[in-house]
Amino acid sequence: MFRFLFASISLIFYTQGAAATGENTYKQVCAVCHQSGVAGAPKVGDKAKWAPLIKEGQAQLTAHGYVGVRGMPAKGGKADLSVADFAASLVFMVNQSGGSWQNPDAKTLERINAEIIKRENAKKK
Ligand code: HEC
């Protein structure tokens, strides 16, 4: 319960922080794995690998990546990475890999946050 509350409150702050550019965050945080495909990470530019992920939709894919899935560490392994910055770095990767996403607006961020909370609750069970 407290963890849930804490997560919700921090999400509110996260989404209000100034966003670094997606490309910078990608280079600083994600490229170490996603440039060359470490441990089966979908490589940037590999359109065949990204197509089914892009199809999941921005809110879902962003939330799943942010919470972490199998070899993909939560927040790309950077504990203080905001949802907005994570989302922007993912937009950069997607747009290098056959997609055309835009940095999430307030409404999309809300949907991403809702998915994150859902996912985190599911993980605890
Ligand atoms: C330590 C290595 C590593 C780092 C750093 C990393 N990733 Fe990943 N990522 C992975 C791996 C491995 C997978 C494949 C997971 C699987 O499907 O088994 C993955 C998968 C993903 C997926 C697909 C998730 C899904 O639902 O299948 C997304 C989206 C993603 N990463 C985004 C990012 C973003 C954005 C960053 C930077 C903020 C990042 N990753 C940093 C290793 C990494």
Image (spheres, rainbow, N blue to C red):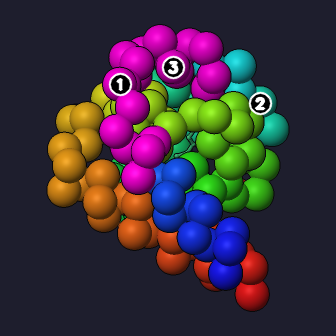
* Badge nearest the viewer, 2 or 1: 1
Residues 86 and 98: in front is 86
Q: Secondary structure at mark 3?
A: helix
Residue occupying image coordinates x 40% and y 69% = 114
Residue 73 vs residue 98: left or right? right
Residue located farthest toward the bottom when viewing the structure as drawn: 125
**Is mark 2 in CB contact (under 8 Å) with mark 1?**
no
| Disc 2 residue: CB within 8 Å of ligand 1 | yes
- 94 is higher (above) or lower (below) than 8: above
Q: Which residues are magenta?
A: 12-30
Front of the two marks 3 and 2 = 3
Tell me which corner region of the image, top left, top right, bottom left or bottom right, holds residue 111. bottom left
Which secondary structure class fits the magenta region best? helix
Report the image quarter containing ligand 1: top right
Mark 3 / mark 2, whichever is N-terminal: 3
Residue 24 included in the magenta stretch of the image:
yes
Q: Position of residue 100 (x, y in %)?
A: 22, 36
Question: Which residue is disc 1 drawn over?
Answer: 18
Q: Tell me the quarter of the image containing the N terminus.
A: bottom right
Asked whether mark 1 lies closer than 8 Å to ligand 1, one says: no
| Image spot of residue 22 (x, y percent) | 40, 22
Find residue 38 and name its label. Answer: 2
